[in-house]
Image (cartoon, rainbow, N blue to C red):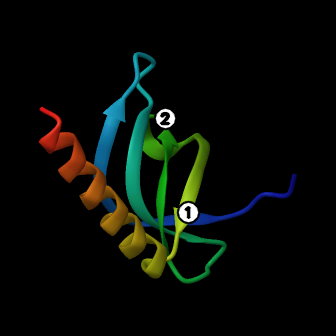
Amino acid sequence: MADFKYEIINEIGVISEGRSGWKKEFNRISWSGNEPKYDIRDWSEGHEKMGKGITLTEDEIRSLYKILDEEIKLLDNNK
């Protein structure tokens, strides 16, 4: 596999941390110099290694927000 480049533009937040110290993070990343996209994936300390993840455009992140907002409302109503 050829090397590829990435630049973390914004470290938005940590979603969770595993026992191994890897963190599931929500960031904006530019992959191979392209327009930055939103990204959710596991990272080792110092962002030296990464796990599989999902990359979303601005439109996709807005759609996901609406879906999550509705799901949270359902969860809150079931308490």
| Residue located at (54% from left, 42% from top) | 48
Looking at the image, tell me whether mark 1 or mark 2 is earlier in sequence order: 2
Image position, residue 51 (x, y; %): 60, 40
Identify the residue under disc 2. 44
For the residues carrying marks 1 and 2, which lies nearer the camera in this image? 1
Secondary structure category for the residue under label 2: loop
Say whether residue 6 is left or right of residue 11.
Answer: right
Q: Is residue 45 above or below residue 26?
A: above
Q: How many marks can you see?
A: 2
Q: CA distance from mark 1 to mark 2?
A: 18 Å
Type of the residue with mark 1: Thr
Q: Is residue 42 above or below residue 2?
A: above
Could you say which is closer to the camera, residue 22 or residue 68?
68
Type of the residue with mark 2: Ser
Give residue 4's mark: none
Give residue 55's mark: 1
